[in-house]
Amino acid sequence: MFKKILIANRGEIACRVIKTARKMGIKTVAVYSEADATALHAEMADERVFIGPAASAQSYLSIEKIVDAAKQTGAEAVHPGYGFLSERETFAEALRQAKIAFIGPNVHAIAAMGDKIESKKLAAKAKVSCVPGFIGEIHDLKEAAKIAGEIGYPVMVKASAGGGGKGLRIVWAENELAQAIQSSQHEAKASFGDDRLFIEKYITEPRHIEIQVLGDKHGNVIHLGERECSIQRRHQKVIEEAPSPFLDEKTRAAMGAQAVALAKAVQYESAGTVEFIVDKDRNFYFLEMNTRLQVEHPVTELVTGLDLVEQMIRVAAGEKLSIKQEDVKLKGWAVESRIYAEDPYRNFLPSTGRLVRYRPPAESITNGRTIRNDTGVYEGGEISIFYDPMIAKLCTHAATREQAIDLMSDALDHFGIDGIAHNIPFLQAVMTHPRFRAGKLSTNFIADEFKGGFHGADLTAELKDRMSAAAVFMQLREEERRRKISGQLNGTTAVSKEWTVTLNSADVYAARTMTEGRDVVAVRLGDGKASRMIEVESTWRPGEPVFLGEVAGHPVAMQVKRKSDTYALVHRGASAAITVRRPRIAALSTYMLFKAPPDTSKLLLCPMPGLVVSIAATVGQEVKAGEPLAVVEAMKMENVLRAERDGVIKRIAAKPGDSLPVDAVILEFE
Ligand code: ADP
Ligand code: ADP
Ligand code: MG
């Protein structure tokens, strides 16, 4: 076994690999860029090597610097994680020449599977069922139209070098083909420096289901069942689970057999993933093979009980697989949520800055229920514009799918993040969505169910009551504290029992506190017949950012922020601003003057720190709502900023190449 390995990556995956190495008694070397001098992965490793500037091209993507770092520290092997150099055959080759082991597949397998056209040819030869289409490069529009016509619309135009959901376009009819080819080609050239395209059938109502494979250097290959990754936004995975609620034993076995056949065809000798697209009749078609550890590998670990990183390290050191196909048993259900630094309320724009608060739910294994959180950040750390915006991967595992989802909902409620925008409310809205819970998934789920964007989960009557009752409880605790501090009242004088609750400045109802104990308050919400008694039990005290307790018999966690006299609460993905006042004060407050915030409706502001790529508008131009105005790049993503309403451009304040802070003015309307 290796004594020391280097991890050629950063963030959560570097931390995750270090954990397993440590468990195996292997020393670790981290590499880090200027932006990562205080990053968690660099802190965790036994040794660390500085490899250059923040831009990945000059650090995490520099083969030379990483090979040098391995030589210099005497690391015998390198784990590439995912992304960065993980699927570069030149990297695996450079390591081979330096006589350093690559914890991944052989150079040929990477090369054969790295190109979508080549891998489809190979898959067809290994009798793997491929998406119908023409397996080859298209050269011009005429040829493309002919091929698309033969396949039958809708079709998908794809970049052969593609990855990360880039260079893909759905084409519903011939008149959209030219545009799709142009933009796909442009994106492929910019992202991969390779603009070869091909066309395949677009499978409608598609589900993304992939098979985890594992091989060794002795010709053994097994599969570890599937993961379903159909919850995607713009062809990028957001929520994954194992097993898939859609597969039966027969389909699973058939997909597994094909995945193993393909892996054997390239002498696969590590962990890898064969991705399939599955139609509503459970026909499945090969999409691509990822020759690396996948982001969502933890759900497979949770249902199989295996440590995939450990398996990768063992087979890289030449060990034989110690498990056979028949030893693989899938147990229970696992779900993963990718927690991203992005603002779901503002079209998922990436967010950067300091993590002022970072309090993940506690990791635990109790009564067959597991909460696991893979992360590479810490409270006080920085989310920079240079790398991918993933903050953490929260996973839960339980006996059934329903229990795993409930556990996830609960864990998401406990997760506290401040300082940057994050997608937890959105993930929560998916977890509580009836269609998701019913397992009726497709890769169009998000587009279908959140058509007009995301505006918070529905505030149902039940949630309103639950949050209002908790707010009354918290208000009582605040008043108690104030009484003690001012010394005006010593607790023997009765506090008010009558309250007026105002929710989101819209719903107003009466509340009456009935009985009150140290940690229990019974609240009557509403008047007369419509009133309901709700018991709240909690040890919450003023200043705590999370309300934990029981409301009407339900265990509840809510994120709490006190803003002057209002509680901003977030629970199950829904937000509510609740004010609890004496009835007389509430009545008087309606006479308060409203102070309008400054009018920024005539400005296009930069939504996050980033680099201006292009400005599409000119002074005097008339634009319609939805028209693109500018493109700003941050976190490897190009973000198109669009007009929110019709208007005429008065002034342009930024130019391509400008590096802007958040809220900088880009242009102004008349
Ligand atoms: P996986 O196939 O393992 O599920 P993804 O498909 O999400 O991973 O991502 C494919 C690759 O693209 C990964 O190597 C990942 O590092 C990278 N990637 C994913 N999302 C982003 C992002 N938002 N920005 C930059 N890179 C990303
Ligand atoms: P990448 O290398 O970017 O991961 P993939 O080929 O794996 O590219 O496709 C990414 C996603 O695009 C899939 O998960 C799926 O949602 C969608 N997709 C790709 N090909 C098809 C297809 N032929 N029909 C329907 N959806 C597809
Ligand atoms: Mg893919």
Image (tube, rainbow, N blue to C red):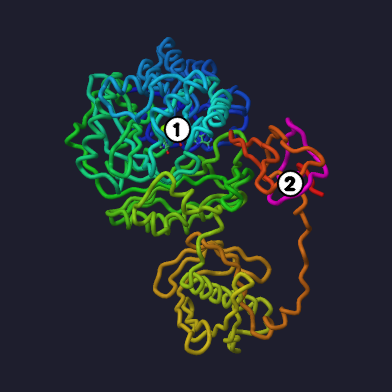
> Does residue 149 sit above or below 632 in this rendering?
above
Report which quarter residue 270 is drawn in.
Answer: top left
| Residue 205 higher or lower than 525, as above or below | above
- The answer to whether 131 is drawn above or below residue 623 in the figure is above
Q: Residue at x 56, y 49 (%)?
A: 422
* The residue stretch that appears in magenta: 644-665
User: Which percent across, then down, holds residue 24?
Assistant: 34, 32
Question: Which quadrant would the N terminus be assigned to in this image?
Answer: top left
* Residue 184 tag number: none
Residue sitting farthest toward the top: 97
Label 2, secondary structure: give it. Answer: strand
**Quadrant of picture, ligand 2:** top left
Horizontal and vertical percent for residue 112? Answer: 37, 18
Where is residue 136 shown, x and y percent of the image? 41, 19
Mark 2 or mark 1: name the one nearer the start of the chain.
Answer: 1
Outermost residue, left direction? 326
Q: Callout 2, which amino acid?
A: Leu
Q: Is residue 568 left or right of residue 148?
A: right
Q: Mark 2 sits on what residue?
A: 604
